[in-house]
Image (cartoon, rainbow, N blue to C red):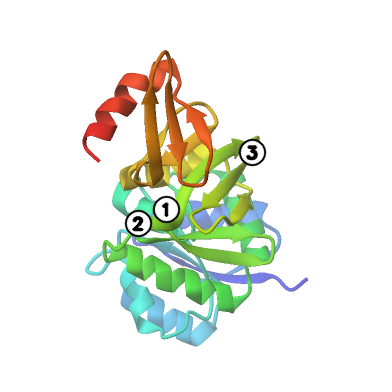
Amino acid sequence: MDPIRAIIVEDEESSQITLQNLLEKFCENVEVLGIAANVMEAVKLINKQSPDLVFLDIELPGQNGFELLDFYNKIPFEIVFTTAYDIYALKAIKLSAVDYLLKPIDLEELQDALKKVVLKRELHWQNKRIALLKENLNNSFQRLALPVQDGFEFVEIDDIVRLEANGNYTQFFFVSGDKILISKTLKYFEEVLSEHNFFRINRSDFISLKHIKKLSRNKKVIVSMKDGNDLGVAESRRDEFLQKMEKV
């Protein structure tokens, strides 16, 4: 298999050296073509080297890393973002199913990201994910990219009725009656969707408050969802859930 030809876009010298060393010493199938310290250097290096992969720091001097995307109508390379903890940026990235690494970069996470790059080197899907990322960076947050076996499903968040934990998988249920099983944990989506009027009512069920059809309060709190399912609210979550419902 041909090596992954990569460049690093990073302004901090220590971070440049660390990532380059990790790639050269522990990632045999990666060839580092060069390093750029800002967006304009990155554009020149990309145009010269035509890399397969760009490790792109979000926090760069003058322009942030996302602005690099504006130089290309179609992104001809895979991207792995690198960042210190930026909550807003990470939400946009996660909703768009784009890969990222938190600094300081962990070797195992780096190797996992490279495995994903090998699987995702279909530019058709890459450009759709980048287009969605741009939407989300503009504070849209209306759609979610879900990785499925043959690519990605791009779904409207408002169409999601509920999510159900299934081991290391998550089952999505939609207003249309469709279901999609995703190989990510419910906790991953809980972090991404909690600000969209979703609430985890028990260990297994994470529901859209917009799609509750009926709420029953007897000995237990039961929610009837628009997909026809009745779900119980855990005792430990009841008060917070009722408070949340008052604000919907």
Q: Which residue is mark 3?
A: 168
Above or below: residue 183 compared with residue 23:
above
Q: Which quadrant does the N terminus fall into?
A: bottom right
Based on the displayed image, in which of its 4 quarters is residue 216 positioned?
top left
Q: Residue 12, which numbered label?
A: 2
Q: Which quadrant does the C terminus fall into?
A: top left
Q: In percent of the image, x 46 and y 46: which residue is there? A: 226
Find residue 48 and report its horizontal and vertical position in percent.
49, 86
Find residue 114 and report its horizontal and vertical position in percent.
62, 58
Find residue 119 and report its horizontal and vertical position in percent.
68, 64
Q: In percent of the image, x 55 and y 31: which residue is there? A: 204
Q: Answer with left or right where residue 88 lies relative to residue 235.
A: left
Above or below: residue 213 compared with residue 15:
above
Front of the two marks 1 and 3: 3
Q: CA distance from mark 1 to mark 3?
A: 32 Å
The 10 Å Cα crowd at callout 3, few under 14, some 14 to 19, many 20 or more, is: few
| 218, 189: nearer the viewer | 218
| 184, 203: nearer the viewer | 203
Above or below: residue 115 compared with residue 125:
above
Q: CA distance from mark 2 to mark 3?
A: 36 Å
| 221, 207: nearer the viewer | 221
Name which of mark 1 and mark 3 comes first in the sequence.
Answer: 1
Q: Which residue is mark 1?
A: 15
What amino acid is labelled 3 in the image? Asn
Q: Residue furthest right?
A: 1
Q: Is label 1 in contact with label 2 (beta carbons under 8 Å)?
A: yes
Q: CA distance from mark 1 to mark 2?
A: 5 Å
Can residue 73 be seen in the rendering of this structure?
A: yes
Q: Answer with left or right where residue 115 lies relative to residue 232.
A: right
What amino acid is labelled 1 in the image? Ser
Q: In percent of the image, x 42 and y 53: which residue is there? A: 15
Can residue 38 be seen in the rendering of this structure?
A: no
